[in-house]
Amino acid sequence: MTENDQGDGRNEGHKHGADYEKGSLTLTGSIAMGTGVMIGAGIFALTGQVAELAGGLFPVAFIAAALVVAFSAYSYVKVCNEYPSAGGIAMILKKSYGPGIITAGCSLLMYFSMVINESLVARTFGTYTMRIFGEGSDSWLVPALGVGLIVVAFVVNLLGNQVIGGLSKVTSIIKIVGIGIFAGIGLWVSGLSFDTLTGNSASSDAQGGITGFLAAVALSILAYKGFTTITNSGDEIKEPKKNVGRSIIYSLLICTGLYLLVTLAVAGNLSVDEIIAARDSSLAEAARPAVGQWGEWLTIGLAIIATISGIIASMFAVSRMLAMLTDMDLVPHRHFGMPGRIQKHTLVYTAVIALALTIFFDLGRIASLGAIFYIVMDMAIHWGVFKYLRTELNAKAWVLLIALVLDAVVLGAFLYLKLTTDPLIVGVGLGSMALIFGLEAIFIARKYNDSREPDDD
């Protein structure tokens, strides 16, 4: 910690008792929060990008991603059932690896993957909003609208937990019902004939093949990773040892069902090339042949609601996570003259990083970077639970190893494909990870040396 954090300011900044209220979240509320984050940019932004990789099998890619995430969720559920905590991911890593470089670095990978997801959500908001005016995703107003949404989400987060919780419940119901109606109408209009699924992807603009499919699965995982925000709620959930796991499972089941219906509806109304052409707003494009102009506007409205609520819920969870890492003394912190609690400061940092990513990266590269960061962190979770915690948690080794292997396979395919098509984003991803772990190594080494100085005198 820095000198700015010493004295009364530091002590007050680390008091989060008012921010974390035990038993303040019901099972329904935590499910709403999980689905609220997941049904944000995932299905609205990623459908076209997944189709570009997997071709006509893109609905299957979303289901395969749900299977991968189901195995992944096992690690989180086992730890959180035994040790419910607001620490979430950081708590799991610390129990596995201790308060060192691996815990700090992997926790930051999760943090940055969530911030990256916020910029993905913000860009998606801008893309769908501009369809109202007949503009594409290449308009300069897309990042401008994304920036505006991040600013609004920042202000809403300043209003407190109750406003966010109430908003999440309402918008989750709207999104689930609205997307369900869209999918039902789309399937009915298409006559349940999903020719796109059996079409020849090689004749389209899609990558196709086993590598393309596995890479699509890696990208589709981003549509589900919002379940991890539930782990950050920890003992705020009523009866956490029972309800944290249930919240995760129910949220994943709800989203998997919706994603399957939606992707089948899109596949039934658009060819692969049409989906790829509208890659950043393919759901709105699919609504046009299904139900006409009013259906497209309805879909745009749903996307706007989903992205607004998703980024608000995500910013809340992400700023809490960084504040917890600060409390655990795993990351440095400076007040920069800002008053109030550390979580308010981390909210500012989160908003600033998300703004920068929204301005400088397009949807495809944002999603790719988020997938790399998240899956690497996820693999660290599984290995840590397998090697250090499985005995005390009574966790099944074969489930943990399958989760680890599935992550490794889809990440390997994704990196291989990106190396041939967009090597820059692979370089940015690997370079960023090296920088994160390098800076953490320096910070922890200095902290260790500072703690030893009194003993040397």
Image: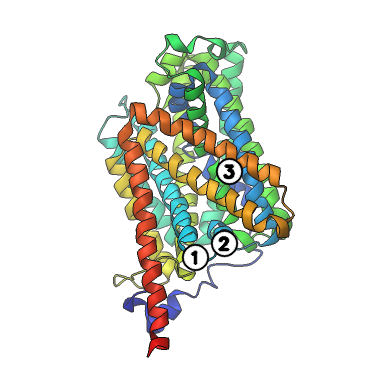
The alpha-carbon separation of the residues under discs 3 and 1 comes to: 23 Å
Residue drawn where x is 70% and y is 42% of the image: 398
Residue drawn where x is 55% and y is 58% of the image: 93
Disc 1 element: helix
From the viewer's perspective, is residue 339 above or below residue 79? below
Q: Amino acid at mark 2?
A: Met
Please tell me which residue lies in front, 154 or 223: 223
Q: Residue furthest front?
A: 456
Which mark is first along the chain, 2 or 1? 2
Find disc 2 in the rendering and name its residue.
91
The alpha-carbon separation of the residues under discs 1 and 2 comes to: 9 Å
Disc 2 element: helix
Disc 3 element: helix
Does the rendering let one see residue 180?
A: no
Horizontal and vertical percent for residue 324? Answer: 49, 65
Horizontal and vertical percent for residue 256? Answer: 62, 33
Find disc 3 in the rendering and name its residue.
35
The quarter of the displayed image where residue 387 is located: bottom right
Q: Quadrant of the C terminus?
A: bottom left
Please tell me which residue lies in front, 242 or 402: 402
Find disc 1 in the rendering and name its residue.
324
Please tell me which residue lies in front, 112 or 411: 411
Residue drawn where x is 37% and y is 77% of the image: 5
The quarter of the displayed image where residue 45 is located: top left
Residue drawn where x is 42% and y is 71% of the image: 341
